[in-house]
Image (spheres, grey):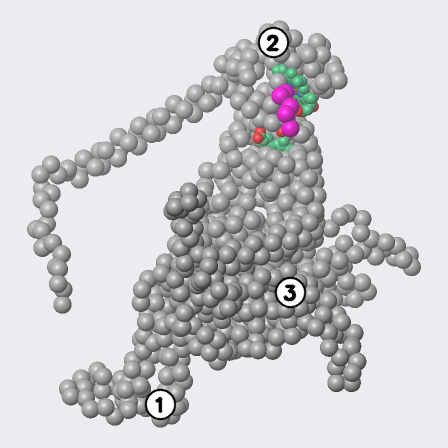
């Protein structure tokens, strides 16, 4: 039947030459693991190293100078507030660290709400500014490290998150719209301490979640959950931005039905 | 396979002198076919079906896509019923998804999670089922648009349009009951909206809601009730209606686009057996394969993110599946404050009004064939599909309907539009409110003009040919562009359509002009006032000479 037979079966290709011993593979994997593990350890120590409280003896005096140069035009020389910015007395170290660490301050208001950007200051400068703001009046302190390890109960955290945060930030932390063009940002990639600080200080349109409302341990649980969904991609495949049925609907119309219609055109164009 | 075997056997059963003795295999199929035929007389039906002709145009395959995705739904759905527990008994989740461990939830949600995380192939089946459902409704929608814009709903197919519409509604109902089953936060939010709509009905609303939910929302029975609808009642009705739909399609035959040799009394295409059946079989696997490919690579309805239903939380970005979106959008577009106080009660129409509008829209879609037939007064059978431009008013109505639906649909995602395009949600809402009215009107007017312009262009081409781009200098120094005449085949496509004129008001048998007549004349004028008639034979002939 076959008129043009395919290329005659060539003999099984020679693989003997240069074949690696199975041990080599094991060794390679081991080296790889050690290397990545080492790099990870290095990365995580550098990450803690950037934690200003540890390496740098923060100085409120240095902070005061920085403040006068960068912030006073809005917040006032003594940080008591002007028409351009609120008083910072009593907002606490947590608020300053959040605002500066996420790059929100100094404010560059373009839309309806100040947005995060790359931080404008080095870790040391931030620590100085934080020390200065904290020295003005008592307020929420920086979170303790033990609450930031993402090792609490993910299921308790998930439940608290659904009740307290999901209405603004979406169940999967994809963010959501508020009125007048304001919005709750997506939460993937936000550092644990900034999550904690956001809860205690309630930036802009976010409510404050005091320790009476959500205890520090519960905050740690929420962080655990947020880190869980950040580090465990959807088991179902691509998540389409976790936007729910809207992105699913668009996908099926554009890619699903689109592909199938293309196929019908192709089939109908074939001569019978 | 067996079907194909049977046909050949049945159709060759007429005594023909076969030279070679039949092989054991063909003798066996022959005997089986005979056995079945003698008891069921099915050969007539198979012969009839086998000779059904399918026109060769891609848009005629959209209905098939719907059927094939329905088969995917049935298969995957059967798998899911083996493991799903439609009960709202409270249990503690002990499966393998960490962020829900130990959480109290309904048995329904727990079993849906088990299907997802602990039953082999379960997640794939869930995703196949859900993606296929989205595709099912989408392909029905597109199929309906094809039928609408080509006028394939006209006599004798009006009833089949209505049945098809019923299928569409059933498909939406299947979808809604389906995504309400897992009893996660999203599905509960959807039910809450239904509950709100029911309660929005004056006087009987609250009682009806209690009846539906077996007490105060959410109650403990709704999942079981939806399950009965979802896996028994609705599919049974759907399959029955689908059967009638297909039967009528065979009886009425397909429409076809105009062309040489295609008339109102034939269908040009390929017969079902064997070519079309082979193509269709292959196409089934293409559709099925596409669904499985999507289902194995793209998440749909990640119920594990939503958590168990609890009436207090609502997530940002809560939306229904796409096919219910237009209803959600209608609710979102109602301006605030649509309520009044009467007899010491506050009456709100902010739910009733959009429901009435949607209901009206759907009723118009369902009865459109009868409405158009009444206006045109056309009682003839139509088997030639209209090119949309040749029915400008209908096409414009369709475009307006599509716009209306699309705006409502977009409104269901107003919040996501706002965040993703950096707009205010109020701005998006106002814009969509305006679009709903003016966009619909504009779509009507623009489409009608475009259709008429295209018709005029067709006419021009038929009469004067196509511009060839060849400029010739005449002996007198004058330049002209040479127009090339169309060949007859191309011309056929352009001239073979029907011409309607506005109805004349005529007195009836009693010599009276009824109100109905007058209304009809008004509508008819609206339909056919602006029109461009097809080129007639006479015009063509006189055209040949100049």
Position in image of residue B331 (x %, y %) = 70, 53
B233 magenta-colored: no
Image x and y of residue B155, in percent:
57, 76
| Residue at the far front in the pictured view | B476
Callout 2 secondary element: helix
The quarter holding residue B466 reads bottom left
Q: Is residue B393 left or right of residue A26?
A: right
Q: Can residue B510 be seen in the rendering of this structure?
A: yes
Disc number lying in front (1 or 3): 3
For label 3, the SS is helix
Q: Is residue A182 above or below residue B31?
A: above
Give the number of marks.
3
* Image disc number at residue B490: none
Give the mark nearest the N terminus, 1 or 3: 1
Q: Majority secondary structure of the magenta segment?
A: loop
Which residue is pictured at 77% across the width and 47% down the height? B336
- Residue B37's tag is 1
Residues at marks 2 and 1 on the same chain: no
Where's residue A43, x and y in %?
A: 41, 24
Q: Mark 3–mark 2 contact, CB under 8 Å?
A: no
Q: Around disc 2, counting alpha carbons within 10 Å, would you say few (fewer than 14), some (14 to 19), or many (20 or more)?
A: some
Q: Residue at x 57, y 22 (%)?
A: A103
Picture quadrant where residue A111 is located: top right
In the picture of the structure, the residue carrying the numbered disc 2 is: A66
Q: Are marks 3 and 2 on the same chain?
A: no
What's drawn in magenta, residue-wise?
Answer: A107-111
Q: What's the CA distance linking mark 2 and mark 1?
A: 96 Å
Front label number (2 vs 1): 1
Residue beneath the point at 49% across and 14% down = A55
Q: Which residue is denoted by mark 3 in the rendering?
A: B528
Secondary structure of the residue carrying tag 1 is: helix
């Amino acid at each position: 039947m076959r008129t043009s037979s395919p290329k005659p079966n060539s003999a099984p290709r020679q693989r003997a030459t240069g074949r690696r011993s199975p041990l080599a593979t094991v060794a390679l994997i081991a080296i790889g693991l050690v290397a990545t593990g080492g790099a990870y350890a290095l990365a995580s120590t550098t990450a803690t190293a950037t934690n200003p409280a540890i390496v740098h003896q923060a100085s409120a005096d240095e902070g005061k100078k920085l403040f006068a140069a960068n912030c006073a035009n809005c917040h006032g020389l003594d940080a008591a507030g002007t028409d351009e910015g609120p008083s910072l007395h009593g907002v606490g170290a947590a608020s300053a660290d959040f605002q500066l660490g996420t790059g929100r301050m100094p404010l560059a208001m373009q839309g309806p709400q100040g947005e995060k950007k790359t931080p404008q200051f080095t870790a040391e400068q931030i620590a100085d500014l934080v020390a200065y703001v904290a020295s003005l009046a008592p307020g929420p302190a920086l979170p303790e490290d033990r609450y930031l390890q993402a090792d609490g109960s993910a299921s308790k955290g998930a439940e608290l998150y659904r009740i307290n945060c999901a209405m603004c930030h979406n169940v999967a932390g994809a963010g959501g719209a508020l009125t007048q063009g304001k919005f709750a940002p997506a939460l993937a990639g936000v550092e644990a301490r900034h999550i904690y600080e956001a809860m205690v200080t309630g930036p802009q349109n976010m409510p404050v979640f005091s320790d009476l409302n959500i205890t520090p341990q519960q905050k740690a649980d929420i962080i655990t959950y947020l880190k869980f969904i950040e580090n465990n991609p959807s088991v179902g495949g691509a998540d389409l931005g976790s936007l729910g049925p809207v992105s699913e609907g668009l996908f099926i119309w554009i890619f699903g039905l689109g592909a199938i219609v293309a196929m019908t055109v192709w089939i109908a164009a074939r001569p019978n | 396979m067996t079907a194909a075997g049977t046909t050949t056997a049945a159709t060759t059963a007429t005594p023909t002198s076969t030279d070679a003795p039949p092989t054991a295999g063909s003798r066996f199929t022959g005997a089986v076919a005979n056995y079945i035929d003698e008891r069921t007389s099915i050969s007539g039906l198979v012969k009839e079906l086998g000779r059904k002709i399918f026109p060769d145009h891609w848009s005629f395959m959209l209905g098939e896509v719907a059927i094939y995705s329905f088969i995917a739904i049935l298969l995957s759905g059967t798998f899911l019923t083996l493991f799903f527990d439609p009960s709202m008994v409270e249990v503690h989740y002990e499966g393998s998804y960490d962020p829900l461990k130990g959480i109290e939830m309904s048995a329904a949600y727990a079993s849906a999670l088990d299907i997802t995380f602990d039953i082999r192939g379960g997640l794939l089946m869930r995703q196949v089922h859900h993606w296929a459902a989205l595709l099912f409704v989408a392909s029905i929608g597109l199929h309906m648009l094809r039928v609408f814009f080509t006028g394939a709903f006209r006599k004798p197919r009006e009833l089949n349009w209505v049945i098809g519409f019923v299928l569409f509604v059933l498909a939406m109902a299947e979808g809604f009951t389906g995504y309400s089953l897992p009893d996660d936060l999203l599905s509960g939010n959807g039910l809450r909206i239904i509950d709100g709509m029911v309660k929005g009905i004056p006087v009987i609303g609250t009682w009806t809601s209690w009846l539906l939910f077996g007490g105060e929302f959410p109650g403990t029975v709704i999942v079981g009730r939806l399950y009965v609808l979802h896996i028994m009642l609705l599919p049974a009705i759907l399959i029955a209606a689908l059967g009638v739909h297909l039967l009528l399609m065979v009886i009425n035959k397909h429409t076809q686009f105009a062309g040489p040799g295609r008339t109102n009394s034939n269908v040009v295409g390929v017969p079902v057996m064997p070519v079309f059946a082979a193509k269709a079989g292959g196409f089934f696997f293409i559709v099925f394969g596409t669904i499985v490919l999507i289902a194995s690579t793209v998440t749909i309805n990640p119920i594990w993110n939503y958590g168990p239903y609890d009436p207090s939380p609502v997530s940002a970005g809560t939306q229904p599946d796409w096919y219910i979106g237009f209803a959600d959008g209608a609710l979102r577009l109602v301006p605030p404050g649509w309520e009044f106080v009467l007899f010491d009660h506050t009456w709100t129409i902010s739910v009733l009004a959009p429901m009435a509008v949607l209901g009206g829209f759907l009723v118009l879609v369902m009865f459109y064939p009868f409405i158009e037939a009444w206006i045109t007064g056309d009682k003839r059978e139509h088997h030639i599909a209209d090119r949309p431009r040749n029915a400008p008013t209908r096409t414009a109505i369709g475009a307006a309907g599509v716009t209306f639906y699309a705006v409502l649909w977009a409104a269901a995602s107003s919040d996501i539009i706002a965040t993703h395009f950096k707009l205010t949600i109020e701005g998006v809402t106002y814009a969509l409110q305006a679009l709903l009215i003016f966009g619909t009107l504009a779509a009507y007017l623009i489409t009608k003009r475009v259709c008429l312009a295209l018709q005029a262009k067709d006419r021009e081409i038929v009469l004067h040919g196509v511009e060839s781009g060849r400029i010739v200098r005449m002996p007198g120094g004058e330049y002209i562009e040479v127009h090339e005449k169309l060949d007859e085949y191309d011309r056929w496509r352009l001239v073979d359509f029907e011409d309607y004129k506005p109805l004349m008001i005529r007195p009836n048998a009693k010599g009276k002009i009824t109100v109905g007549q007058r209304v009809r004349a008004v509508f008819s004028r609206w339909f056919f006032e602006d029109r461009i008639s097809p080129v007639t034979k006479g015009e063509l002939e006189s055209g040949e000479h100049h």
